[in-house]
Image (cartoon, helix red, strand yellow):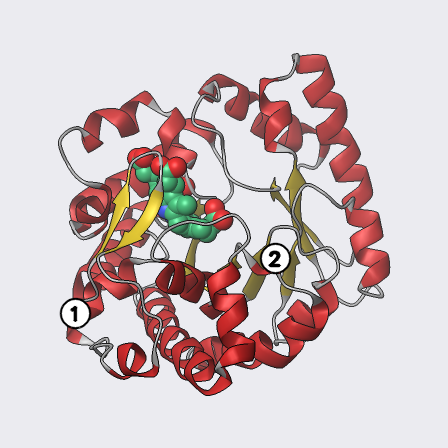
Amino acid sequence: MRQAGRSLPEYLKVREGVAMLDSCLRPELASEITLQPVRRHDVDAGIFFSDIVIPLKLAGVGVDIVPGVGPVLDKPVRTAADVAALPRLTEESLEPIREAVRLTVEQLGKTPLIGFAGAPFTLAAYMVEGRPSRDHLGPRTMMHADPETWTALANWAADASGLFLRAQLEAGASAGQLFDSWAGSLGLADYTRFVAAASSRALDHVRDLGAPLVHFGTGTSELLVAMRDVGVDVVGVDYRLPLDEANRRLGGTVPLQGNIDPALLSAPWEVLEAHVREVIASGAAAPGHVLNLGHGVPPETDPDVLTRVVELIHSVSPE
Ligand code: CP3
């Protein structure tokens, strides 16, 4: 999950004096940062160090990640002319991403690497608002007020994300995760009408590669079936919904990923341990369970607690 690295002193050290998005475009550095949590916590897979806005940056859209704020664009994208003027992401510009993945996979050996990309709605939410927002009014207004412009923007984002994910999978990542972090601000009707097709289009860029695909969002308890129907192998569940209930809603059709509550990483160990055991028990209802957090690692998390959580999981569920 996003921000995993921020709790690690070795991450803060190598990032000193390097801006977030610049660190993603230096292959050796991005690879080193990807490997840090794998070495330290002995997790079963690495997640590629990058960001969902990297395809925008590589296409030439003015975007930065402002510390403590998140992605901020030089100029929000709000009109048909703004969308028409968006630059295309080229294959060549993705070379630093491919190189970082190649270096990482080489060093990971048998441990798989998970690649990822942002889903069109979440990317478009940043593009229309120009910065993080709580309720994403801009994109939600646009889809109704100017559906043609919305569709063009969502398709642009789908193609940029799809190419970004494809570059990672072709260079050796073993699975792909589509992050629709802010899809939870949509009702099911809007999700189905204005978003699902674009998310599917993003994944159309990689389906022929055959890698397992995971689809995750937050606040998406009401959207799980629609998110599965975009065409994925695993549905990621945030910390709000117990996995047995998510499995019931999905009719037992698909493996789940989730969903330790990040808030409990700072609770007393006994409380956290009981919660982790509950998540494992709850996930047993599903046809498969990839255990992870129900959203990002809070930066103040004690890294030793994360290591201990992984040890606990391996002791309960060695396979
Ligand atoms: O944790 C990891 O290092 C894995 C790689 C990763 C990052 N971003 C690096 C990152 C992944 C998978 C992401 C995805 C991402 N980026 C998402 C989807 C997942 C989610 O968390 O919902 C989203 C919404 C973003 C956009 C973004 N990037 C935000 C909102 C922020 C936080 C800004 C802040 O300071 O609070 C970022 C920055 C970011 N991306 C960091 C990392 C390690 C923190 C950078 C730092 O401060 O060092």
Mark 2 against mark 1, which lies toward the viewer? 2
Left or right, 258 with respect to 287, comes to: left
Up/down of 158 relative to 187, above or below: below
Residue farthest along the bottom direction in this orientation:
148
Residue 196 x/y as whole percent: 59, 76
Q: Are marks 2 and 1 in contact (CB under 8 Å)?
A: no
Residue at the spot 64% in from the left edge and 24% down from the top edge: 264
Up/down of 266 relative to 200, above or below: above
Name the foreground residue: 89 vs 33.
89
Q: Is residue 319 visible?
A: no
Secondary element type, mark 1:
helix
Q: Residue under circle 1?
A: 93
User: Cβ of disc 2 within 8 Å of ligand 1?
Assistant: no
Q: What is the quadrant of residue 73 in the picture?
A: bottom left
Q: What is the quadrant of residue 76 in the picture?
A: bottom left
Crowding at dot 1, Cα within 10 Å, few <14 / some 14-19 / many 20+, comes out as some
Q: Quadrant of the C terminus?
A: top right
Determine which of the numbered discs, if any, sits on residue 187 in the image: none
Name the quarter showing ligand 1.
top left
Crowding at dot 2, Cα within 10 Å, few <14 / some 14-19 / many 20+, comes out as some
Amino acid type shown at disc 1: Ser
Q: Residue under circle 2?
A: 185
Residue 137 x/y as whole percent: 52, 60
Distance in Å between CA atoms under marks 2 and 1? 32 Å
Q: Earlier in the sequence, mark 2 or mark 1?
A: 1
Amino acid type shown at disc 2: Ser
Name the foreground residue: 44 vs 76.
76
Name the foreground residue: 263 vs 97.
263
Secondary element type, mark 2:
helix
Residue 59 x/y as whole percent: 21, 70
Residue at the spot 64% in from the left edge and 62% down from the top edge: 234
Left or right, 229 with respect to 33, comes to: right
